[in-house]
Image: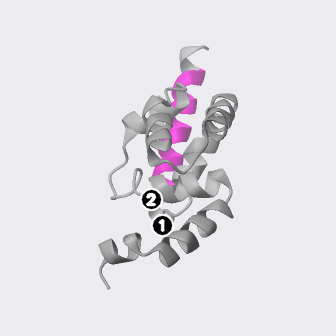
């Protein structure tokens, strides 16, 4: 059975929808964006945008996915604005240890740069 046949199969679609509905929004976001920070090369721009609370791309993608209600999207956006690291951590949920370490170093180096800038 091809992916297209699986998606069009109402039994499979209901089961997948039920599986998604049983997950926390954070887990669904982690699954959706798990490849955003993968690939070996650190996307410093993404890390900087998260730290600067520039979540427009992630909010738009979440809204376009059709997996979340407008209320859930607003709640996710509020939680990310309150704690940008929560999005960062969600993106790294499925990352391998080396990728996670590289991104942690990038995050920490920006913390250090901020500290020096304001010192």
Q: Which residue is mark 2?
A: 99
**Magenta stretch bounds:** 101-115
10 Å crowding of disc 1: few (<14), some (14-19), many (20+)? few
Residue 88: x and y, percent? Answer: 56, 44
Q: Which residue is mark 1?
A: 96
Task: Using the numbered discs, state the Cα–Cα distance from disc 2 to disc 1 in whole angstroms.
Answer: 5 Å
Q: Main secondary structure of the magenta part?
A: helix
Instruction: In the rendered view, tell whether residue 35 sits above or below residue 87.
Output: below
Of 18 and 34, the residue lying toward us: 18
Task: Look at the numbered disc 2 and give the secondary structure of its residue.
Answer: helix
Residue 74: x and y, percent? Answer: 64, 32
- What residue do we see at 39% from left, 76% from top? 6
Q: How many marks?
A: 2
Residue 27 appears left or right of 97: right
Q: Is 107 a magenta residue?
A: yes
Q: Quadrant of the C terminus?
A: top right
């Amino acid at each position: 059975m091809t992916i297209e046949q699986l998606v069009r199969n109402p039994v499979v679609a209901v089961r997948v929808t039920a599986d998604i509905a049983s997950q926390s929004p954070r887990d669904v976001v982690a699954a959706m964006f798990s490849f955003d920070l993968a690939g070996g090369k650190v996307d410093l721009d993404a890390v900087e945008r998260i730290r600067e609370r520039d979540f427009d791309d992630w909010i738009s993608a979440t809204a376009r996915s059709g997996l979340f209600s407008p209320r859930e999207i607003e709640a996710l956006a509020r939680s990310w604005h309150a704690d940008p690291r929560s999005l960062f951590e969600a993106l790294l949920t499925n990352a391998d240890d080396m990728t996670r370490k590289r991104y942690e170093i990038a995050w920490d180096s920006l913390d250090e740069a901020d500290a020096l800038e304001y010192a």
